[in-house]
Image: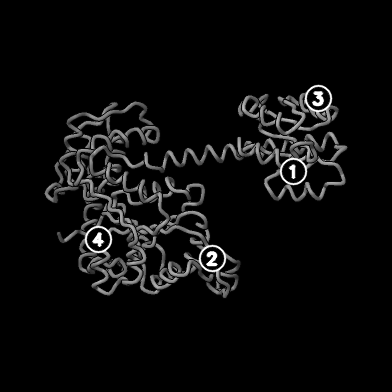
Amino acid sequence: MNNPIDKRVLIVDDEERIRNILAAILKDENYEVATANDGTEALNKMADFMPHVAIVDLQMPRMNGLETISQMMQIDSHIVPIILTAHGTIQSAVRATKHGVYDYLTKPFDNEQMLLVVKRALEHYQLAAEITELRKELSKRHGLDSIVGNSLMMQKVREEIKRIAETDAVILIEGESGTGKELAAHAIHYESARKNGPMVIVDCGSIPMSIIESEFFGHEKGAFTDAREQRIGKFEEADTGTIFLDEISELAMDAQTKLLRFLQEKEFARVGGGNAVKVDVRVIAATNRNLEDLLKAGRFREDLYYRLNVLRLRIPSLREHKEDIPLYAAHFIEKHKQTVNRGECEISSDAIQVLMSHDWGGNVRELENAIQRAMLSMSGRRIEAADLMFLARQSSSNSKQYDGEESLESYIKSLVEYTEREIIIKALEESKWSRTEAAKKLKLDRRTLFNKMRQYCIEEKSEN
């Protein structure tokens, strides 16, 4: 509706004088106007005129105003209806506003008031249209098309996501760090019947244990020292939509118990409150660890595991479908070329070979970071193999010796990053990959450790 003349109003009234007065006033304000003397004629004009707002008389022969509006909205659910009524039927008009009618006008109407109501109705239509477009854009950006890859393996992942999205069951997504578990969760949400509801993401690994119940379920005013007002939690925020619990394996046993209770009862109480709060939420959980191993070690509740493991989706590591690397590279170049102010950009065949030969322990996330870094450092309009030499330095400890090919400042920075990564991995291995224990060893808080693991694409190594 960028054109200011594109403001279409349909007037439906069996009194010709009323139709003509309304039409004249609205045309003076640059509205496009069509008129109909009853509901049947109005419905016939809908397809050609496509009104944004309809002013409909409540009392008409053959088909009354509410019946007319009901059938109009079946043709176009976005139309904004206004009821026109005599003083004696105002109560009926008020009741109509509870059933989809935007507002009402009384006969005889005040011209200025009528124009104000129509203006607001048109704004309501425009806002609804913008929301619809935004939802379409979100669905396009985060739906099935966001899952990139032409390999047979990734085709099967997309097929599985589409099948899962048609259900409303709890889902457990498994995969190494950086494989795209969050992307898959978004795709499930935006391909499902819940796509118009909220999508709430909770990073279980970065929430301090002391506040996790409040984060999940909210709290009442005065529940604890800093609770100065009521606050809703993530599950309440996700009502009618989807909640994505990333790194579910990092939940402490007490938090696991509270999550299990919610999954069983579909309700919870805010911290400091006694009243049960019911919400309609689909739960998607994700982990980069083997939950069955955690079960055996007594670090994950068996009953919660079975509640979460209703439907399972595995996202493969990049090493399992390296044939998709050229496509990913092109995708990330297109995604980031505006951010890094590179305009047109491509990648050489030699650079592709460097990408194909790398191990990609950090999976697709590491590949995206590599493409961004190469785009920032390249000298021309094409990523060359030389722009990816930092991958070789990351892959071999021998490369930590200074060779004079880069500045001393750059070398020291890469050496610090390499050393920090190795220290973190060593602490995690010594702690049997317990992030809480590793953070204590390193004298870091859990959130900082988690962020550094993401930065360096650190994941627990499989024993297989």
The answer to whether the residue labelled 4 contacts the one labelled 2, judged by CB atoms less than 8 Å apart, is: no
Q: Which of marks 4 and 3 is in front?
A: 3
- Spatial CA span between label 1 and label 4: 62 Å
Q: Which of 293 and 232 is in front in this view?
A: 293
User: Residue placed at 26% from the left, 28% from the top?
Assistant: 382
Give the residue at mark 3.
24
User: Residue placed at 44% from the left, 57% from the top?
Assistant: 282
- How packed mark 1 is, by other alpha carbons closer than 10 Å (few <14, some 14-19, many 20 or more), is many
- Spatial CA span between label 4 and label 2: 42 Å
Q: Nearer the viewer, residue 227 or 231?
A: 231
In the current view of this chain or complex, which residue is farthest to the left?
A: 398
Q: Nearer the viewer, residue 300 or 446?
A: 300
- How packed mark 2 is, by other alpha carbons closer than 10 Å (few <14, some 14-19, many 20 or more), is some
Name the secondary structure under disc 1: strand
Q: Which of marks 4 and 2 is in front?
A: 2
- Spatial CA span between label 3 and label 2: 51 Å
Decide: is 115 above or below 278. above
Q: Which of the two discs, 2 and 1, labels the residue nearer the N terminus?
A: 1
Tag 1: amino acid: Asp
- How packed mark 3 is, by other alpha carbons closer than 10 Å (few <14, some 14-19, many 20 or more), is few
